[in-house]
């Protein structure tokens, strides 16, 4: 099994290793030794858990899962780390259908089902428990010795492998995904009851009596990259309607993570990127809770993406991915603009209270970009009409991706039009910020989710901009803001508190983008 897995499931690993260590005379023995390590390591892991009751089910699961990890690693150059496992678990059925392809079926049959069937059928003779135990100890010892001796014989190579080329090990299969499952469990679950840590219970709105109420619509974008917005100088006109509006564009903004599951909770979290973790984010109240503690702000989360990733658990939440609330479900997809549907009613019902509405978009969710916009927005052609991105040219992928941005441009323009109706009664603003970027095939990398330190700029440099009506603009003194300064998701927490003039001990004015009094 170990030899089989090493030979047929590690194409990604070997193609990455060969890039760093080309098969020269100096490297050839070392390259061969990596296979010995991989076979021994896989055998070691399997042997630890093997027993009369576990061997077959374990091997069958490993084969089925590894056939899929091999497919995703080979096709999209993704890394199956604990964050990717989280993404997979939090992905809903509809998104999985989007990813589904014929090639994936072939992987599943030839690397999953058929070998799993062979394992199922093959007879294994077990000896007594004592004999099995003793031989297992010997076996593990021999494997450990083989690994130690191999590493020592190529010490120079393995020390550089461990220090400088750490990412190479991320594409080993199945060892790395098995490690990642353990790491996922470790970073996700706690023993004992969950207790949410309170935050900013002292929050209150500082407001003049005559000040008009505020409506802020925060649009959380999906998988859009800054360099594909004409607001940031992209050579194509991808935001023709926003161009007509008075937009304040922030050109130098970076995401907290490279996936929805990390970035969305992180951007609403009190913790910055440097001290954020999934558990801390989930078990501590976020900026929506702090705003809620004022009892003076109505908060509503509308979701057309998947869910709020735990952010909106304690505020009103509406799901727009089916036609229950969403009245714009056409061509097989519920559109983002459906979230605007009943907003007027909602705003009227709040009777002059301050309002924060979060719209979590489907946006540019890949790989089926061509499904993310109505036909009328297919301006850039030809487009990639399959989820097998590697089967399309980069031009076709970019066309489909840019058309989806055109549709977001339309959605945002409609949002601004809606806000303009409240010009005389409210201070209104729309903020757009993406959760992370996207790779479109540069260097063979697609989609997103690479570990942050090795992610290309395309996955972390995100579009962010705002529109505000005149009364809001004046009070924010927007012209004083340096829009080219580097900002990150860390700024959102404090900027939202600032926008609603909330006073609390957890507010840090230096991170509030609109606070111009700080220096
Ligand atoms: Zn996302």
Image (cartoon, rainbow, N blue to C red):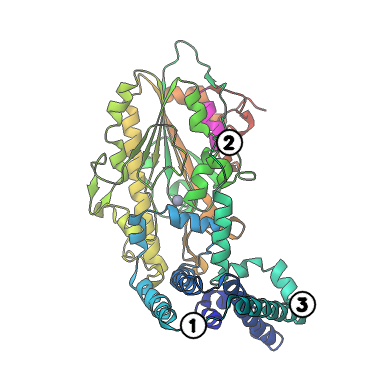
Q: Residue at x 42, y 45 (%)?
A: 221
Disc 2 target residue: 270
Say whether residue 482 is magenta.
Answer: no
Number of numbered labels in the structure image: 3
In this rendering, position of residue 150 left or right of residue 319? right
Q: Residues within 10 Å of mark 1 (few under 14, many from 20)?
A: few
Can you see residue 226? Answer: yes
Q: Secondary structure at mark 2?
A: loop
In the displayed structure, would residue 318 be above or below residue 294?
A: below
Say whether residue 494 is magenta.
Answer: yes
Disc 3 target residue: 155
Q: Magenta residues? A: 492-501
- The Cα atoms of the two marked residues, 1 and 3, are separated by 38 Å
Quadrant (top left/top right/bottom left/bottom right) for the C terminus: top right
Disc 1 target residue: 124
Quarter of image, res 135: bottom right
Given contact means CB atoms under 8 Å apart, are the residues at marks 2 and 1 in contact?
A: no
Q: Secondary structure at mark 1?
A: loop
């Amino acid at each position: 099994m170990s030899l089989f897995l090493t030979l047929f499931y590690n194409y990604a690993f070997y193609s990455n290793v060969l890039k760093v260590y080309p098969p020269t005379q100096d490297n050839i023995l070392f390259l061969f030794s990596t296979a010995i390590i991989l076979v021994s390591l896989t055998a070691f892991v399997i042997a630890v858990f093997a027993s009369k009751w576990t061997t077959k089910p374990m091997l069958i699961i490993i084969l089925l899962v590894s056939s899929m990890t091999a497919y995703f690693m080979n096709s999209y150059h993704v890394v199956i780390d604990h964050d990717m496992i989280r993404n997979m678990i939090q992905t809903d059925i509809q998104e999985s259908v989007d990813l589904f392809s014929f090639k994936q079926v072939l992987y599943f049959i030839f690397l999953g089902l058929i070998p799993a069937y062979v394992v199922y059928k093959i007879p294994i003779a077990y000896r007594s428990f004592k004999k099995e135990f003793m031989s297992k100890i010997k076996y593990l010892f021999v494997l450990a010795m083989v690994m130690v001796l191999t590493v020592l014989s190529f010490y120079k190579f393995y020390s550089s492998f461990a220090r400088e080329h750490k990412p190479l090990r991320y594409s080993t299969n199945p060892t790395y995904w098995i490690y990642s499952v353990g790491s996922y469990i470790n970073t996700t679950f706690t023993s004992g009851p969950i207790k949410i840590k309170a935050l900013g219970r002292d929050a209150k709105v500082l407001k003049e009596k005559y000040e008009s109420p505020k409506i802020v619509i925060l649009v959380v974008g999906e998988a859009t990259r800054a360099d594909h917005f004409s607001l940031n100088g992209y050579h194509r006109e991808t935001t023709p309607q926003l161009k007509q509006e008075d937009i304040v564009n922030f050109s130098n903004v970076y995401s907290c993570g490279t996936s929805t599951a990390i970035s969305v909770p992180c951007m609403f979290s009190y913790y910055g990127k440097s001290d954020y973790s999934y558990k801390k984010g989930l078990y501590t109240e976020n900026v929506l809770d702090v705003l809620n503690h004022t009892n003076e702000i109505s908060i509503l989360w509308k979701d057309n993406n998947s869910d709020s990733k735990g952010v909106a658990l304690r505020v009103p939440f509406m799901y727009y991915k089916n036609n229950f609330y969403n009245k714009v479900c056409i061509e097989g997809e519920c559109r983002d603009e459906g979230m605007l549907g009943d907003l007027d009613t909602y705003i009227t019902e709040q009777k002059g209270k301050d309002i924060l509405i979060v719209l979590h978009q489907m946006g540019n969710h890949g790989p089926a970009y061509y499904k993310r916009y109505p036909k009328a927005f297919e301006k850039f052609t030809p487009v990639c009409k399959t989820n097998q991105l590697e089967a399309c040219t980069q031009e076709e992928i970019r066309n489909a991706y840019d058309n989806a941005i055109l549709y977001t441009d339309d959605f945002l323009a409609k949002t601004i039009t809606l806000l303009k109706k409240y010009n005389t009664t409210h201070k209104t603003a729309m903020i757009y910020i993406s959760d992370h970027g996207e790779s479109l095939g540069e260097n063979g990398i697609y989609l997103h989710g690479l570990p942050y330190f090795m992610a290309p700029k395309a996955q972390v440099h995100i579009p962010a901009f705002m529109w505000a009506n005149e009364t809001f603009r004046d009070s924010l003194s927007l012209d004083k803001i340096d829009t080219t300064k580097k900002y990150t998701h860390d700024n959102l927490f404090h900027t939202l508190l600032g926008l609603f003039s909330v006073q609390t001990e957890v507010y840090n004015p230096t991170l509030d983008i609109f606070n111009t009094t700080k220096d």
